[in-house]
Each structure stands twice: as C-alpha cells, then as structure tokens.
Amino acid sequence: MAGFLRTEAGKGLALSAPASLYVGLLVAAPLGILVAYSFWTQTYVEIDKTLTWANYLEAATDPLVRHLMLRSILIAGAVTAATVALAYPIAYFIAFRTHKKTLWLLLITIPFWSSYLLRVFSWKLILGFNGVMNSALISMGLITEPLTFLLYNEFAVVLTLAHAWAPFAILPIYVSLQKIDRSLLEAATDLGLTKLERFIRVTLPLTVPGIIAASLIIFIPTVGDYVTPSLVGGSQGKMVANLIQVQFGPANNWPLGATLSLVAMASVGFVAILFVVLATALGRRIR
Amino acid sequence: MTTQNIIEISGVEKRFGTFTAVRDLNLTLKEGEFFSLLGPSGCGKTTALRMIAGFQDHDAGTIRIGGQDMEHIPANKRPTNMVFQSYAIFPHLNVGDNVAFGLRKLKLGKAETEERVAEALEMVELGGLQSRKATELSGGQRQRVALARALVMRPKVLLLDEPLSALDKNLREAMQFEMRRLQQKLGITFVMVTHDQYEAMTMSDRIGVMFKGQLKQVDKPEVLYARPCSQEVAAFIGGMNFLDAAVTGEMNGKLHADVRGFGPLSIDVNPNVARRGPQLLAGIRPEQLEISAQKPDGYDGYLQGTVTNAAFYGENVHYHVTADGLPQPIAVSVPNYFHTVDHKQGDPVWLGVQNASVIDLGAREA
C-alpha cells in the first residue's frame, strides 16, 4: 500500500482522491439519482420503478412545459444581453479610464454584502404600486396613476437579475480588457484607425473570451432561477424552475420534476454551446 | 539631387508634471536618412519618438513632417508608422491580416490589398506565411511582421522603438544589416530609438545622443566616435580613457598640453567641444594605444606601468595598466592576431600613443 502511494500513478490518485470523492458524492451521485427518477412514475404516494419514457413524452408534448422552457431561455437571454451590455462600459472604465482600480472593483462588490433576497425585495419596493419609482414620478407630476407594468412581469425579472448579476459580468470582462497590451491599441492608431474603429477591430475581438465567460456565468443559472421570478415575476414572469419546484413540492411528482430538470439542463447546455460557437466565429470574422 | 528635409523639430519640450522629459529639442532630418536617437534609459529618446508619432503631445515648440505642422494632427492621421518595442502583433489575427490591418482602412480592394501584403511579406523574407497564426511566430518573425505591417502603409517616416532589443545577439546582428539594406532600398526615412551604441553605429547615417532630456550631439557615427562633444558622450560610445591635462599653449588648431602619465602632447582642437574650462580633459581610445614589453619606437607619448588585469575577449585582448600618479588604470585593447595573451598580470609594460590619437574633450564634468 505504502509502496503503491510512492508511484507516479499512486500519487496522482491519492492527490485527486478528495476532489473525486467530492464530485462523486455531490455531483455525480445526485445526478444519477435524478436520471433514475426521470424514468420512474409517481403513483399517488408510491414510486413505480418500472422504467418508462412517459415523463419525457409528457415534457415534450405539454405546451406549458414548452412555453415555460422557451420563456426561461428568452428571459435568461435578455438578462444576459442586458447585463453584458451594461457591464462592458463599466469594465472598460475600470480597465482604461481610472487608476483607482481596486477601489472601483471593491465598490462593485458592495451589493454582495447584503443578502440576495434583500436585494430582490428592494426592487419590489422600488418598482411596486406604491413604490419609490411610482411615488417619485407622481410627485414630479409626470404621471397621475401609478404605473403597473413595472412589477410582476418579465421586465421586473430582467431588471432585478441584470442588477444582481452585474459584478459577475464586470469582472471577467474587466480581466480580458486589462490583459490587452496597450501597445496593440497604439499600433491600431498608428495604422490609421479612429478610436471607434480601434475598439471594433482590436478591443472587442480580444475581449470575446471575457464576454463569453460573462454570458455563460449569467445565462446558465438564470434559466434555472426560481427565486426572482416567484418574487417579482408575477404570473407572466414564471419560469421553468417554478414548474420544477411545483413538481417536487405541491404536485408531489418527483419523477416529472426530475425529467423537467434534465430537459432544462440539456436545453441550457445546447443553447450555451451554440452561443459559444457563434460568438467565437463572430469574433474571428473581425479582421 | 537635393534632398528635402522630412522632419523639422524646433524648440520641442515635454513635461510630465514637474519632470521635464525632453527640453529644447532641435533636429532636422533629411529624406531617406537612417537616424538613431541614442541614450541611456530615461533620457527622453522614446518620448521624443512618441511625440513624432503623435502618441504624446508636445508642450512647446513645433514638429513638422514633410513641411506640415503636426500640432493638431492626431497619430492616426500622421504620415508615420511605427515598429513597437514589443512589436504589438495583433494576437487574434494571422500574419496576413496583421500586415493588411492598416490597408483595410484604406479600402483598396481585395486584389490590391493582397498584392501589397504579399509584397511586404516578401520584402521581409516572410513570403507565403500569410495564414500563419500570430501566436506561432518566433521573435525574429514577429519583428519582421511588425516591420512589414508598418512598411506596407508606405509611410514618409518609419519610427522604430528599440526594434532589436528583444532579439538574441546573433539574430540582432543579422537584422541590423537587413534593416539597413531595406531602408536603403526603400529610401524611407528611418528614425530609431536605441540604447545600444553598436546598433546605432552599424545602422545609422547619423546619430543623436541624448542625456537627461537634452540632445547633446548629432553626428555621423565615425565623427561621434572620433570627436565626441563631451565627457559623457565619449563615455557612452565605446571605451575611453580619461586623462587630465594641463594646457601649455595653443597654436594652429593644436593644443599643447601636459597629459597626465604621458607627458607633453600636441592635441587637435575638437570643434565639437561644448564646454571649456581651465583644465583640459584628454581622451584616448583603448584600441589606439600600443602596449609592449620594451619601449616601442615612433610614438609621441609614453607611459611605463604594470599590468593589473588581462582578459581574452576573442576578437581582442583587454589589459588594465596602472602607473604611479594615475587615479585609474588605463584600458588597452589589442587585436587578437596570434591567439595569445602576451602580457600577464604584474608584468611591467610600456604604453605608446600618437598625438593624433588623443581627443580633446574640453572641460571635465563633475
């Protein structure tokens, strides 16, 4: 035993054992259980362990599932686009326009010092019927009746998440901007480019990896988010995760819940890979 | 054929806060000239180059390129192109796209762009490597791509910021000749910044030596070497023995002086000398001294001393010789003819020097 641990292979196995154990117990095993459940059936209080495609058939044919899945992906896409678009200028400012980088990076993480739930609730206070936004607009005389389209819809979900995810987008984009050799920008200027052309032909393609990283970090968890939609999404802001939660909770149909989780996972994976391929190809086209 | 002035710089100054990086820079460069700005790091030479390129504004004075005042002309509109010290090769583009980078802006059409790229790559001996990835290039190849990318724009002036400092010694020497050949073939004015005196001397038509933001001397390499204007310029270019001398008289452009260690010598007045003082500083290049075990015949000044150090350098042998009354040992360099080190440490030797080998350097600097 001690002899085996001194060999290259033994050392490798020993060193990777904690991680393997961790991943095995906390990722692979639950995933295996999920896959198993997805082929079973709920019969009132019992689980029928006969293997069947019935759940997948239901997931594929039920218009509600399709509708919620599509809406989740669209909302997540909108959240990702909004967050990256808002984060890029901030990251650009920190990387190129200020010497107080540490201070700015610290300021950006400040929202994280409070609980995520608190931040979502704050948005309810801001966007609500008698919320900050409506009161302000009314007192300024811009509107007479409170706006009702602010809260309990997709817009509220996108706004809340775009704010919550901002640091996750700013940091990878900042890193990729920071890595750009400043002489590359001078070279582009030297070769006759204006600042805008230089941004499009040098800065943007060189930050594609950062944009991809930011997008994936935001898109993947957003598709599966259920806290925000249930708090600020209302009925039209519901997403697939809310449906999954219902299966594991009130509806007590774990097998269908498991199936929906796996379908959601596969859809997210597919869209994410498609996005990476497209973004990389687009970045390469800029010459 | 009259050659036009391509760059005229007058009274240019650049300050960073309280620090003056470049002061009262005056310089006129001719079309087709290879000019080097030489100086130690921090002397302001790169700042001067960046002001010509337009990456830095100047606080005073004027810079004219091709007769046009560059005051309000941004870097991207100037008829100059630059080879950066880091080469600044775009990592997301292949070699062809790197070279075509500036041409694409000119919208020349696909055929002409490709033709000019191919021609430029051919010129730097990278023909056919258009599709090679930028990340797969060696240091020497990166340097050539940077050169091609700048030259393909057909600039009036090519600016080079320490272009060879990232290369190893053999490649650097090969590139020195190649860049010189390229410059002569194209007839474009090259302005190079370097801290390497040999690089500057082998490549340039003229060299400007800068210290502490000031241009001290502008001359051909051989004049700079034979008639440096001051002690600091002399010390920066090549080896030099500095000896105090007392002037006893001056006649027909000759200074009669008692040179410490060597006795009375007759020294040509150096017209480049910037500063005179009561004391004269004489300079003697190590390779201009004769070293011998017996007193050699036919020299104007002699010194008897002891070898304190002998070092074999390959192409030559270096000795240090001390004598009574000399504050520092005298450096002597002898060509290596017979692969022997003739004098050992502790050997008594004679040094001989001709009048013509002694350089008048004006006043000693503090």
Image (tube, rainbow, N blue to C red):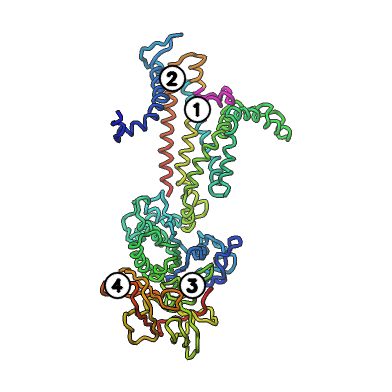
Q: Nearer the viewer, mark 3 or mark 4?
A: 4
Residue B320 seen in the figure: yes
Which amino acid lies under the numbered mark 2 shown in the image of this protein? Ala
Q: Nearer the viewer, mark 1 or mark 4?
A: 4
At which x and y percent is residue B246?
A: 50, 84
Residue assigned mark 2:
A258
- Camera-nearest residue between B44 and B205: B44
Are tags 1 and 2 found on a single chain?
Answer: yes
The residue pinned by badge 3 equals: B232
Label 3 environment density (alpha carbons within 10 Å; few <14, some 14–19, many ≥20): some
Q: Nearer the viewer, mark 3 or mark 1?
A: 3
Q: Which residue is mark 1?
A: A72
Mark in front: 4 vs 2? 4
Q: Nearer the viewer, mark 1 or mark 2?
A: 2
CA separation in Å, label 3 and label 4: 31 Å
The reply, left or right, for residue A210 in relation to residue B137 is right
Q: CA distance from mark 2 to mark 3?
A: 81 Å
Residue A229 counted in the magenta span: yes
Marks 1 and 4 close (CB-CB < 8 Å): no
Q: How many marks?
A: 4
Give the CA separation, mark 1 to mark 2: 17 Å
- Mark 4 — on which chain does it sit? B
The magenta-colored residue range is A221-241
Foreground residue among B266 and B78: B266
Q: Secondary structure at mark 1?
A: helix
Could one spot residue B78 in this view of the protein?
Answer: no
